[in-house]
Image: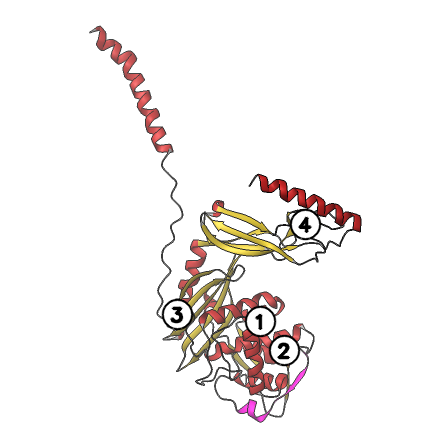
Amino acid sequence: MRFTRFFCRRLLPLLVSLLLVASQATAQIIPTPQTMIPSPPQLAATSWILMDADSGRILAEHNADERLPPASLTKLMTAYLVERELDQGNISPEDLVPISEKAWRTGGSKMFIEVDTQVSIDDLLQGIIIVSGNDASVAMAEYLAGGERPFADLMNQHATRLGMHNTNFVNSTGLPDEDHYSSARDLALLSQHIINDYPEHYATYARKEFSYGGIDQPNRNRLLWRDSSVDGLKTGWTEEAGYCLVASAKRDDMRLISVVMGTASEEARAQETQKLLSYGFRYYETLKLYDAGAVLNTPRVWGGDKNELRVGVDRNVVMTVPRARSEELTAKLDIQADLTAPITAGDRVGTMEVRQGEELVGERPLVALEGIEEGGLFKRLFDQVRRFFTNLIGGWFD
C-alpha cells in the first residue's frame, strides 16, 4: 500500500514528465520539409517555354529548340529593330514613312494604311505591335533597309547577335515561307531583350486597342483583359503555325516570359499560357542578391599604385529559386591569383558561383570596379620580392 501511494504521488508524475520531454525531443528532430515543386504542366501545344525575364532561368520547357513557323511572332524582331533605331537616335517617332503599293497590298492582318500616303514611325510601330499589321511591317522594312530582303538580312544578323540559334527570317511579317522559322527558346530570348534593352517602348505591348484612319482594332492577346499582371507581348497565327502567343507578366518583383506555339485556337493559346504563368509565379521567386557596383572583395594587387583592387559585378545579380528556399543560397567568389597592374576598370578578374545546396543555379563574371595603374620602379621591384617570398612561404603550408 505504501509503495502504491509512493508510486502515484512521486514516481508517476516523474515518469509522465520524462515521457513529455522525450516526446518533445523527438518532435524537435523531425526535419522541416522543403517546398515541394510539382512537375511543370503539360500543354496542348507543339512547343513551349517559361523563362524568368531578369535571371534568364528556364522554369519549364518542351520542344523549346524545335524550328517552327513563328507566324506574326516574327514582328517581335521587326519591332525590336525599330526600337533600336529609335534608341540610337537614327530615326524619331515623328518621322514620316512613305507607303508603297507593295506595303498597301500585303495580305493578312492590316493596320489599313493607304498607298501614296505618309505615316509616322510612332503610328507604324503601334500598328505592328498592337494590331499585327503586315502592311505596317513591310512599310518599316522598306524605310529602314530599302526592302524586305535586306531587312530580313538585318533581322538575321541581330538574331545571331542575340544568340537565337534556331531562327531564320525571310520577311518582316511572318507570312509563310519554308525557310522562315524560329523556336520557343529564341523567341523568349528576343522578348527578354525587348523588355530589358528598351523599356521605354515596352508599354506599347500592353495597349488593348489601336485606332488608325477611323478603324478601331483590338489587341488579340486575350490575357490583357483577363490578367492584370500580363502586359505583353504578341500573338501569331497561320495555318502552318497554328495559334501562338508570347506573353509576359509581372507580379511583385518577378517578371516571367512564356512562349506557346502550335495550339488549336485563340482560346487554347490563352489558357495554355495562363497555365505556364500560374505555375511559375506559384512555385518560384526571383531574388536580387547583389547590386551592380557593390564591392564584394578587395584582393591584393602586385606592382600597382594601389595594393588592393575593389572587385564586384557590373550588373545586378538576380536568381530565380523555388519559393521558401532562399536560405539555401550560397555564393563563392573565385578570383584570379596574382593580380598584377595595370588593371582597367571592367576587366574580368574572376567568377561568382551561386549554389542552392549542391546545385549550381548561376554564374556571373567578377570585374574590376576601378582601374589601377602601374606603380613606380621601386614599388614594382619591392612587390616582386614580396610576392616571391609570399608564394614561397605559402607553398610550404600547402
Question: Which amino acid type is shown beneath numbered disc 4?
Answer: Arg
Instruction: Give the quarter of the figure containing the C terminus.
Output: top right
Dot 3: element: loop
Task: Identify the mark nearer the N-term, 4 or 2.
Answer: 2
In the image, residue 197 lies at what x, y percent? 60, 67
* Between marks 1 and 4 in the image, the one whose residue lies nearer the viewer: 4
Q: Which residue is mark 3?
A: 63
State the mark number for residue 122.
Answer: 2
Give how far across and how far down residue 29 sits, in percent: 37, 34
Q: Amino acid at mark 2?
A: Asp
In the rendered view, tell whether residue 41 sits above or below residue 245.
Answer: above
Quarter of the N terminus within the rendering: top left
Answer whether residue 143 is magenta in the image.
no
Nearer-the-camera pick, 237 or 392 = 392
How many residues crowd around disc 1 within 10 Å: few (fewer than 14), some, or many (20 or more)? some
Instruction: Mark 2 or mark 1: name the one nearer the start of the chain.
Output: 2
* Nearer to me, 214 or 51: 51
Q: Is residue 97 magenta?
A: yes
Mark 3 vs mark 4: which is more N-terminal? Answer: 3
Q: Residues within 10 Å of mark 4 (few under 14, many from 20)?
A: some
Label 1 and label 4: CA atoms lie apart by: 41 Å
Is label 3 in contact with label 4 (beta carbons under 8 Å)? no
Which residue in the structure is indicated by mark 1?
204
- Local SS, label 2: helix
Which of disc 3 and disc 2 is earlier in sequence? Answer: 3
For the residues labelled 2 and 1, the Cα–Cα distance comes to: 10 Å
SS category of the residue bearing label 4: loop
Side (left or right) of 306 relative to 4: right
Earlier sequence position, callout 1 versus callout 4: 1
Question: Bounds of the magenta span?
Answer: 94-105
